[in-house]
Every structure is written in C-alpha cells, then in structure tokens.
Amino acid sequence: MESSLSPYAALLTALCQIPVLHYLVAFWIFSFIYLYNFLEFHFFQDLLGGGTPIGLIYHPSSELYKTVVSKCKVLNARYWATPWVSSPHLMTCFLRFLGKSPDCTYTREIFRTPEGGTLALDWLLSSNVSGAGSQGNNKISKDDTTRIVIVIPGLSSDGNSNYIKQFAFHMARSGWNVLVSNHCGMGGVQITYPRFYTAGGTEDLRTVINYIHNEYPKAPLFVVGTSIGANILVKYLGEEGEKTPIAGAAAVCNPWDLLIGDRFIDRKPKQRFYDRALAAGLKRYAAKYARRLREYDTHAACMLSNFETADAYYRMNSSASYALTISVPLLCINALDDPVCSKETIPFDECRANKNIVLATTQHGGHLAFLEGFAGGMWWVRAVNEFLDVLYSNPCKPVQKEPYVNGKENGFHLL
C-alpha cells in the first residue's frame, strides 16, 4: 500500500498544475491594487462621484463670499482631476513636465533693497501677450491704470518655473500686468547681502509692494502667493492689517504651520521623498549640503536669521497665527491630499472667523498641481484668475474686526 502524500506535498503538486499565465494575471492584479492604494489614486472615486465638490469655508456674514466668491463659477463647480494622473503624488511629481510652457518673455527689472539686497522682478505685460501694444514697449507709464498682480513663487521656484509661467501668461492674457517677485538669491541673481530669503521673511515682499504702489499709484494692486510664497504672503497681510495697499490676494497651497508640516513631511517614506527633493532644490544656496529640508533650515536659515533651533524658526515663520489679522479680501486654496502641506496645518476655524477670508479646499489636487482635463491644465490658475477678475469688478471693503486673542511669539496677547 502506497503512503499518501503529505498535505504540503499535495498542495505543492496542486500549485504546480496551475498555468503560469494565471500567476502572472494574479501578480498584475495584486500590483495594480497595491500601487493604486500606495500612490493614492482616485480615478474610480472621481468616475463614480462625477468629480469632487469644492469645499468653501467662510464666515456666515462674509461679504467676500456674497459679492465675489458666490459669482465664481469655477469655485462653485466640481473639480475633475486628470484621469490618467489622478494621484496626488503623480500630479506633484509631473507638474513641471506636464503642459507646454507658454511662449512668453519677461522683461527683467533689477531692484535694490534699502539694505543692499538684490531682487529680480520679472514683468509680463498684458499688451505684450495680447499683441495690443508694441512688442518693443515693455514699460508701464506712471499713470497707467492697468491692474497689476504680483506673483510670489514657491520654495526654490522662480519666474521660469513652468507653473509660474503658465499662471503669469494666463493672467496677462486676461488683461493683467504680471510681476513675478523672485526671492532673494533666486532667478539667477547673486546674493549681495548676507541674508537669504526665509519661509516667513516678509521684508522683501513689503519693500516690493510699497515700491510698486509708489511707482504706479493709479494701478490696482493684487498679490498671489504659491506654496512657501503663500506663507510669506499671508504672514505679510496679517502683519500689515489695514495698512497694506493691496486690494486683494490669493494663497495657493499654503503650508500654514511649518512646525506641523515638518513633522508631517518626515512621517512616512513617501513624504520623506518630498523632503529630500525640496532640500535638493535649495542645496545650491545652502552654506553646506543638506540632504533634508530640516538640515537646510537648521544650518542655513536658522544661522542667517538668528534662530537657535529649526523648531523656533518654524514657529516664528508660520502664517497660521496671522489669519485673524488679515484685512483684505483673501482666497486660500488647499488640496486635502497635498503630499507636501498636510491638511492638519490648515487653520479652518481662523479662516471661518475672519470675514475677509474664503478658504477653498479640494479632496484632490496634490501640491500646486490641481491638474484637470486630459491635457492636464491647472485648475487653480482658472480659479484664482476668475476670483481676481470678479473681485476687481466688485471691490470688497475691509471688514472692521472686534478684539480677539491671537497667539504670537512666545505667548498670547490681546489685539
């Protein structure tokens, strides 16, 4: 009598009888499911849900919402992500490669700050893009009334970054004179003062805004900040209050709380990838090579800005604590799946409490991407353009605010 096979041998025999093709199919199905979840794809959710709605957070009696945002079709519609790149990670990584960079040429103005710094101001005039004016006429007269929008790029970005050029071209084609205010040391300009730009340093922005306002006093002035540029913008608006000459602003993908953001970006391998990528963009300007963003902030930004630790630097340069003091119409746009700026940093309550702010959130969009359509256009460009157009046509007066408590520096005080 023959001995029966052991259960393990019988199982192995059965597995060997399964065709190899079946194993390959199972492998591809498993790989697809794994990558779909690992890269946080949302193609099927978008398909079944018909896109995702835009979340709008604002004060119940906000005039900004009633007179401006309620009239913005883009902000009151649904966001459809580009199907073949419907992942926050793919969107963010492919941002610089998607879409042909617009055929536009800036006119550069070298601006010297009072302290001796050098900034590159890149102009793109509406007349040059539309063809209404002479291509050789790249100057604005002092009495020009054409609206001006100042653009503040993100970390390690400048006027030649693809997303900045696309936004500048789009705005110029819509009748705006665009000024890209490059950060100190960016845009191919040498550092002429022993201070590099920081995540919350508002000195350069304040100087540029006052300069433009004095040079073109009849031109309505607006500002748009992206990523770390949005943090600088919001902090500036909070510091200035009603003193700023700005008529309106938009902040896209603001990191808000840099300390929470630092913890978030070091939490998982996917986030640490962005951490190293951001630091790599700054290594040309760092005092020593930094593999991670925190290393750059510790060895360069802290040293040049007189902060003892990176955490102290993050606390003092975060814009979230300034949200309540903003006195001009401000649209804030954040994606809740942003792999760089965590949704945990967004000050929802502060934005809702300030009648001058409307916060627009999308379930998807990545960091500065918000790609839509098969061609991969940027949704936020259309949203900001329409918001500023409607705001320009329906100006909102700053709302007088009652006293409130605002956490600042090392303690709390009544403003």
Image (cartoon, helix red, strand yellow):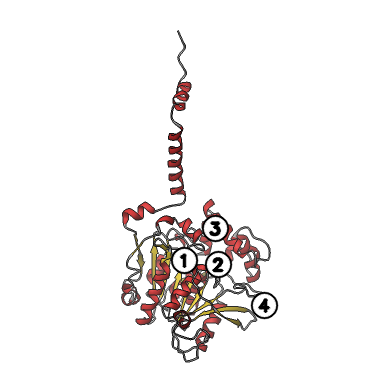
The answer to whether 149 is drawn above or below residue 15 in the figure is below
Which label was assigned to residue 155? Answer: 2
Residue at the disc numbered 1: 253
Q: Is residue 413 visible?
A: no
Residue at the disc numbered 3: 274
Which one is earlier in the sequence, the residue at label 2 or at label 3? 2
Q: Return the residue found at the far right.
A: 288
Q: Are marks 2 and 3 in contact (CB under 8 Å)?
A: no
Amino acid residing under circle 4: Thr
> Neighbour class for label 2 at 10 Å: few (<14), some, many (≥20)?
some
- In the depicted view, which residue is nearer to us: 97 or 368? 97
Secondary structure beneath label 1? loop
Which one is earlier in the sequence, the residue at label 3 or at label 4? 4
- 375 left or right, relative to 281: left
Picture coordinates of residue 105 (x, y %)? 53, 77
Q: Are marks 4 and 1 in contact (CB under 8 Å)?
A: no
